Image (cartoon, grey):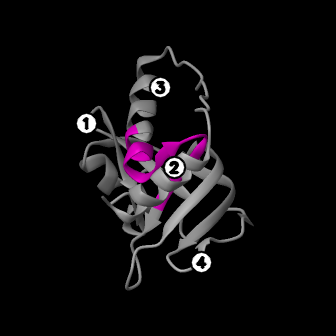
Amino acid sequence: MSYVNRTVQSLSTRLGGEEKTKAPTATDPEDIAKRAALDGFMQTMFLQEKGCHFTQSKWGAKSTPYQMQGIQTIKLDEGSLNESDRSAGIDQRVTFEIKIREFRQYDEKDGWGSWTKGNPPHLDSVTLVRQSGVWKVSVSPLWAYSLK
């Protein structure tokens, strides 16, 4: 069992009931495909448990679990394209800001630290591109954070 899973399991034992949130429903096929790509990224990046999100840093000598509250993804203006993008079949680019109300880190010795307002370092946005008609992640903080 991974370090994040153990800490989440420990936290789950102490907390009661499951909190569920409803996401707005998209009806446009393009919006549905874009949302599916974004949701796939979020599931790769975060574990959602009891109304909180968890991930762990991948830099440094040892992974560090993070717990976050109040995660939102906010669509920014569409990005510009260049000839290289077009020749690669990219016809749209959009960036979503990742906004986190507060986070805290887990330490093996001291347990969960104090809550800090804002985002953890390097966890700020994800960029999607539509390439050959398929939406996919092109830039993300997966180099710095992951569930594994």
Could you tell whether 64 is left or right of 70 in the image?
A: left
Q: Residue at x 59, y 28 (%)?
A: 20
Label 3 environment density (alpha carbons within 10 Å; few <14, some 14–19, many ≥20): few
Mark 1 lies on residue: 132
**What type is the residue that disc 2 sits on?**
Gly
Task: Work out how far the residue at label 1 is from the one at label 4, CA to CA, in angstroms.
Answer: 49 Å
Indicate which disc, 1 or 3, sits on the residue closer to the N terminus: 3
Residues shaded magenta: 40-55
**What type is the residue that disc 4 sits on?**
Asp
Indicate which disc, 1 or 4, sits on the residue closer to the N terminus: 4
Indicate which disc, 4 or 3, sits on the residue closer to the N terminus: 3
- Identify the secondary structure beneath mark 1: loop
Along the viewing direction, whichever of 86 and 47 lies nearer the viewer: 47
Image coordinates for residue 26, horizontal then vertical, percent = 52, 19
Image coordinates for residue 102, horizontal then vertical, percent = 70, 58
Asked whether the beta carbons under mark 1 and mark 3 sit within 8 Å of each other, the answer is no
Label 1 environment density (alpha carbons within 10 Å; few <14, some 14–19, many ≥20): few
**What type is the residue that disc 3 sits on?**
Asp
Q: Which mark is residue 110?
A: 4
Q: Residue at x 29, y 31 (%)?
A: 133
- Confirm whether the magenta stretch covers residue 49: yes
Along the viewing direction, whichever of 69 and 76 lies nearer the viewer: 69
Indicate which disc, 1 or 2, sits on the residue closer to the N terminus: 2
Indicate which disc, 3 or 2, sits on the residue closer to the N terminus: 3
Is 16 located above or below residue 99 in the figure? above
